[in-house]
Image (tube, rainbow, N blue to C red):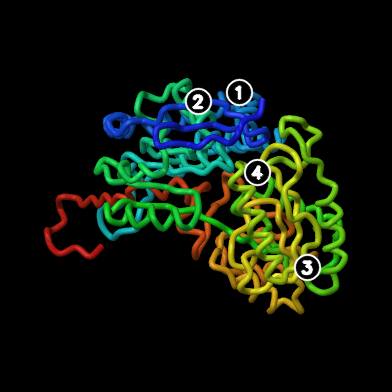
Amino acid sequence: MTTATPSVTRTSITSVNPYDNEVLAEFPAMSDEEVDRAVAAAHDAFQGWRWFSPAERASVVGRAGELMRERREELARTVTLEMGKLIGESRGEVDLAADILGYYAEQGPALLADRPLLVEEGKAVVASRPLGVLLGIMPWNYPLYQVARFAAPNLVAGNTILLKHASNCPQSALAFERLFRDAGAPPGVYTNLLLPSSRVGRVLDNRRVRGVSLTGSDRAGASTAERAGRNIDKSVLELGGSDPFIVLDAEDFDRTVEAAAVGRLSNMGQSCVSAKRMILLPDVYDRFVEELRRRFASLVPGDPLDPRTTLAPLSSEQAAKTLVSQVRDTVDQGATLVTGGGRIDRPGAFVQATILTDVRPGMRAYEEELFGPVAVLYRVAGEDEAVALANDNPYGLGGAIFSRDLRRAERLAERLDVGMVWINHPTSSHPALPFGGVKCSGYGRELSDLGINEFVNKKLIRTFPTTVPIGFATG
């Protein structure tokens, strides 16, 4: 059954399959009163949850990770149906999200341990204590992974969670909420909010909410940070990216091209850390363009639930229309279309895998983030030009450098204005490694020890023996 893409109103949250535009499910949005009650319940739950030991809280998070693995196929299918991800990639996302839950269940208590300070008399420690109710505003492109990297560390830290997920993946959001309920989290510790983005301000303005983490566009990040600032709430933002993929030599050519294809086409290019701008030195450029064109042209569109499919739809009809518009405008401005560039003649939000060259400043593909299977390839004369081009961008999330000369690659990595650089591997994610960027890509870090320390009160506890005279103490 195929229907027209539905219009989502303020009173409903709708799940649509982008493969065929079929409406999967529709949920009533929460009323203002329901939202207020959810915030109050999260605040009440915090009064108890904060006094659970870190090990007790970690046990609940760890159990949620175990349940996620047990429900792997169910969760993967839900993700694929709601946002169009290839089923193999959906399974991989489930595994990564479960790894994150497991990492913080195992490592979280130690990462939160009190840190002693060196003082002349008595003792001093910095204690990591929770802030309270946190709001997470999550995107649709990784419906499970994005939530896991926000929720896992903050629950172990003793905060309680309100989760406002993207409106096109409500079933994924509800499935994640069930994980924590079934894992034994007390009521109010983790609560999913079914409401449109236009009504998030009500949650941010509630005095019981003490922090917000948003993953999304730089426009949404600026609005959220402004509102959080007015309320004096801590915020963490992981926003857009236009990551450079720099190839310094022709060594290991096949592996490098494979990395470029994976780095750009994973999740159909709908990733902030996709290899969006490929910057190539002259001795590799022509051969690289042709080989990448061949790989892009060989992709097979189809049902993302079918393992034979290699080209999945984008997340929505609007996403597909926007991407094609960006490509067409860039070509009209003088860029060269190597392959692709349009829609695929079939139902669903399909866009051809596309390669652009001869893109210059002022063109849409130079100035904007391309969220889909579109690679922009640049020829540069040398390292200095490569660095200048890589940094000539408002974003600064990640980047990748490929070279057999590791010292050369590491020197170049120091010069990139980004939060993460991966050498000889596409930009990726791991529970123990910090994730985040600079410039218009946001601020703060998720994952690793840095992620669990973003939303905690670093409380100083200074103890003197009673034999010390009272006076002005400097240390």
Mark 3 → mark 4, Cα distance in angstroms: 37 Å
Label 2 belongs to which residue? 179
Check if mark 2's residue and mark 1's residue have beta carbons within 8 Å.
Answer: yes
Tell me: 4 left or right of 220.
right
Q: Amino acid at mark 3?
A: Asp
* Residue 76 place in picture, x, y as percent: 64, 30
Q: Amino acid at mark 4?
A: Leu
Q: Which of marks 2 and 3 precedes in the sequence?
A: 2
Tell me: 267 left or right of 190.
right
Q: Amino acid at mark 1?
A: Arg
* Residue 429 place in picture, x, y as percent: 61, 48
**Residue at 71% from the left image edge and 68% from the top image edge:** 409
Label 1 belongs to which residue? 71
Q: Secondary structure at mark 1?
A: loop
Q: Quadrant of residue 329?
A: bottom right
Q: Amino acid at mark 2?
A: Leu
For the residues carrying marks 2 and 4, which lies nearer the camera in this image?
4
Mark 2 → mark 1, Cα distance in angstroms: 9 Å
For the residues carrying marks 3 and 1, which lies nearer the camera in this image?
1
**Residue at 74% from the left image edge and 70% from the top image edge:** 378
Q: Secondary structure at mark 3?
A: loop
Q: Which of marks 1 and 3 precedes in the sequence?
A: 1
Label 4 belongs to which residue? 314
Near-viewer residue (203 or 251): 203
On screen, 375 above or below 5? below
Mark 1 → mark 4, Cα distance in angstroms: 25 Å
- The circle drawn on residue 405 is 3
Q: Where's the N terminus, which quadrant?
A: top right
Mark 3 → mark 1, Cα distance in angstroms: 43 Å
* Residue 24 place in picture, x, y as percent: 57, 26
